[in-house]
Image (cartoon, rainbow, N blue to C red):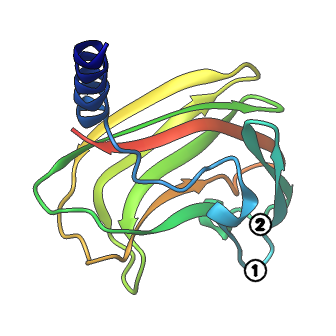
Amino acid sequence: MKSLCVVVLSIASFAFADAKTNLLKPTNEADSWRFEQFEGGKGSLKADGDAIVFTITDVDGTNWHVQALVTDLDLTAGKEYVLKFQIKASESRNVTVSAMVDQDDWHTIGLSETISVGQEFQKQEFVFKAENVAANKNRISLTFGDAKGTVAVKDMTLTAK
């Protein structure tokens, strides 16, 4: 019986060591996000089961005037990362997905893509090499101030490749 326990523990330890570590807080919780609204851009966010739902109520023609951020990421320059999530919207729309520094000049650090989002959950996956990072001051940004409506995101992970 002892040898069986050792084998089971060894297999479990190997599987755990091989798993990719998610660098993000649970993204279906409202306090894991910083929701930003500028000038005429207005909206809100709320947790809804396994998803987070962003509601954009007012827009002013500048997409970054409504955005949601996952902050305080400590990424390593030159390292590749994989960002995965599922996303849907109340109506077809574009959403910009970026990795950026979270301090003045807010430059991108290897990821800036605009995606088309439909009314059914779609899987998204981005592989990027982090460059020009800031220690503990990086972020993942979703920018959606182009149009009113809702955007839901679930199962978001960020792992080192």
**Which residue: 33% across, 50% down?**
111
Front in this rendered view, residue 66 or 138: 138
Residue 59 marker: none
Residue 107 visible in the displayed image:
yes
SS state under label 2: loop
| Relative vertical location of residue 43 with respect to residue 39 in this rendering, above or below | above
At which x and y percent is residue 13? 27, 31
Residue at 26% x, 77% y is 134
Q: Are discs 2 and 1 less than 8 Å apart at CB?
A: yes
Task: Answer few, some or many: residues within 10 Å of disc 1's Cα (few below 14, many 20 plus, some between 14 and 19).
Answer: few
Q: Residue at x 66, y 52 (%)?
A: 144
Q: Where does the N terminus fall, quadrant-wise?
A: top left
In the rendering, at what x and y percent does residue 16 appear?
31, 33
The quarter of the displayed image where residue 151 is located: top right
Q: Mark 1 — residue? A: 39
Q: Earlier in the sequence, mark 2 or mark 1?
A: 1
Left or right: 161 in relation to 90? left
Give x and y (percent) for residue 103.
40, 83
Would residue 112 appear left or right of 9 to someone viewing this image?
right
| Residue 33 in view here | no
Residue assigned mark 2:
60
| Mark 2, other Cα within 10 Å: few <14 / some 14–19 / many ≥20 | some
Q: Quadrant of residue 21?
A: top left
Residue type marked 1: Glu
